[in-house]
Image: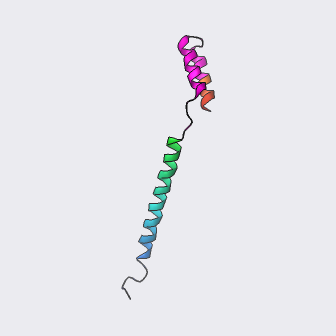
Amino acid sequence: MDSMGGAWMIPMVLGAVVFWGALIGFGVWAVRRFTGRPRGNGFRTLEDRFARGEIDADEYETRRRILES
């Protein structure tokens, strides 16, 4: 029988929990980071209209916020 009894299990379990928690946290972060909403045709159209002068800066910002929500 070893002299520590079962005390070696506590740091081992805590280490495993921290490791798996960090791994899952990184996975969630990576998925959210790289699968964000693509800037599709709506944004492109809005940017083109702003560049051509069809809409002013205030209207551009309002519509951009709507598209992002």
Q: Give the residue at x 63% y 28%.
A: 66
Q: Is residue 18 left or right of residue 37?
A: left
Q: Position of residue 36 (x, y in %)?
A: 54, 39
Quarter of the image with the C terminus is top right
Q: Give the residue at x 55% y 34%.
A: 38
Q: Main secondary structure of the magenta part?
A: helix
- Relative to 11, is 51 above or below? above
- Relative to 5, is 9 above or below? above
Residue at the farthest left position: 3
Q: Is residue 48 magenta?
A: yes
Q: Give the residue at x 56% y 23%.
A: 44
Q: Tell me how the rendering is colored.
A: rainbow
Q: Position of residue 11 (x, y in %)?
A: 41, 71
- The quadrant holding residue 63 is top right
Q: Is residue 1 left or right of residue 26?
A: left
Quarter of the image with the N terminus is bottom left
- The quadrant holding residue 18 is bottom left
- Relative to 47, is 52 above or below? above
Residue at the farthest bottom position: 1
Q: Give the residue at x 50% y 56%.
A: 24
Q: Is residue 33 magenta?
A: no
Start-end of magenta stretch: 36-62
64 or 31: nearer the viewer: 31
